[in-house]
Amino acid sequence: MKGLPDDNGLFMPATIPALPQSFFDNIEDYSFPDIALEVCRTLIGGVISDDKLQSIAKHAVNFPAPIVSLDEQTHILELFHGPSLAFKDFGARFMAQLMAHFNAGETRELTILVATSGDTGGAVAAGFYKTPGIRVVILYPSGKVSMLQEKQLTTLGHNITALEIDGTFDDCQALVKQAFLDKDLTNKQRLSSANSINIARLIPQSFYYLEAYKQLKDKKTPVVFSIPSGNFGNLTAGLLAMKMGLPVHQFIAATNANDVVPAYLASGEYKPRPSVRTLSNAMDVGNPSNFARMLDLYSSTWNIMKQDIKGYSYTDAETTAAVKAIYDDTGYVLDPHGAVAYLAFKAYQEANKEVQGVILETAHPAKFIDTVEETIGQTVDVPERLAILAKEKKVAIPMGIGFEGFKEWLMGF
């Protein structure tokens, strides 16, 4: 509920217990909600009753995460079948259920602050929409999210408020972090976060790594997960699943021009820098928060981390070329983020033939419809729940990157 600790660090589990081997031996017998429940029992059992955990898992994981195989070694894990058509629906819905549980009986409203580079805001807005006793403030960088992504943030109303920040995602995230450290604000408001800086976002993201493994017909060939990476919550959740026993041969951190983590994996030096704008905008992060969690999981040991995680980065031109090539070869339509992960897996596969790859497709291609349609030369089917947003009126409060202006607004919220 707190989101961030007082020292501006990040919460981590004190221990990460492993799931029993019998679970993995029989994983094909488990439904997706059952897998979620087993992870929750293992990590947070005893804090919440089994009945309540089962209810939370059932409501949070009520849409599929299917694997589509392009060939015997190349699998796409579709994570866009939730209400906002992005992988972050899993974390947002789980967190909304969890927070509503812990917030029951509180007389003061809980205000959730969330910075977004694209998909987080839409997922959080959908997950917390009309949740009693909770209001959500979404900070997003002006002009740096797609039109339909912006509509997901700015059209719901009710308990969802959007702030259009004249800056980058990193500026939005800095404002959120500073708010948690400001005593005036924390004394006046009950604040929490729904970004992946909140550990409750990471736990449910580990569910679909297990769900992906369950669906693989061949469980003997080593499994490589290629992950489009921005704030690195998704990859960190994969590491959590591996620590709990999931047999993973390799993780691939696939980035765009914002390649500070691949650069670290290559050199051992971490050099954050201002993010730059790309077509894969949800990955436009120059100082990813979850890098600190990655370091923690590896006791800050670069030599060990670089063995488990390989880093690759790609330009916009390479990304769109991949979208077109995959469509021309297979008829499958990837969004720009999934295309970056596809390129990274294929580059890894050149030197590692005897593996199979699970490529995380994190958003529906229709969320980037202009780029995708121009690239493949075909119209993209737009799910109805996204298409209707195009006609809705955007409602957002413009704001600069100065903390005092944000604080003044939040104090009066």
Image: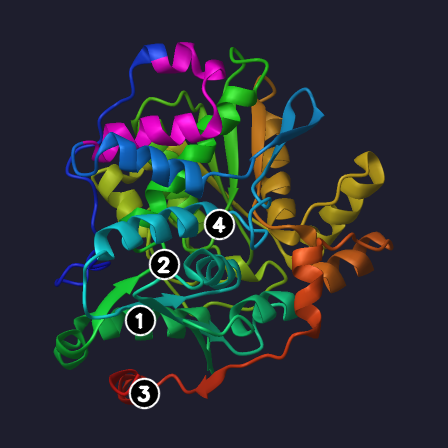
The residue nearer to you, when weighing 232 against 79, is 79
Q: Pick whichever of labels 1 and 2 is earlier in the sequence.
A: 1
- Residue at horizontal 37 percent and vertical 66 percent from the top: 114
Residue 195, numbered label: 2
Q: Which mark is residue 89?
A: 4
Amino acid at the residue labelled 1: Val
Q: Quadrant of residue 234?
A: top left
- Report how far apart the C-alphas of labels 1 and 2 lie in the structure: 10 Å
Residue 257, position as x, y percentages in the image: 54, 59
Q: Closer to the observer: label 1 or label 3?
A: 3
Secondary structure category for the residue under label 4: helix
How many numbered marks does the figure carry? 4
Q: Quadrant of residue 35?
A: top left
- Which residue position holds label 3? 409
Residue 235 horizontal/vertical position (percent): 42, 42
* Label 1 neighbour load within 10 Å: few <14, some 14-19, many 20+: many
Residue neighbourhood size for the residue with mark 3, other residues' Cα within 10 Å, grouped as few (<14), some (14–19), many (≥20): few
Mark nearest the camera among 2 and 4 is 4
Mark 4 / mark 1, whichever is N-terminal: 4
What SS does tag 1 mark? helix
> Circle 1 sits on which residue?
176
The stretch in magenta equals 23-45
Magenta segment includes 25: yes
Task: Tell me if residue 216 comes above or below residue 350 in the rendering.
Answer: above
Place of residue 353 in the rendered image (x, y in percent of width and height, measured from the top left): 61, 20
Q: Earlier in the sequence, mark 1 or mark 3?
A: 1
Amino acid carrying mark 2 in the image:
Asn
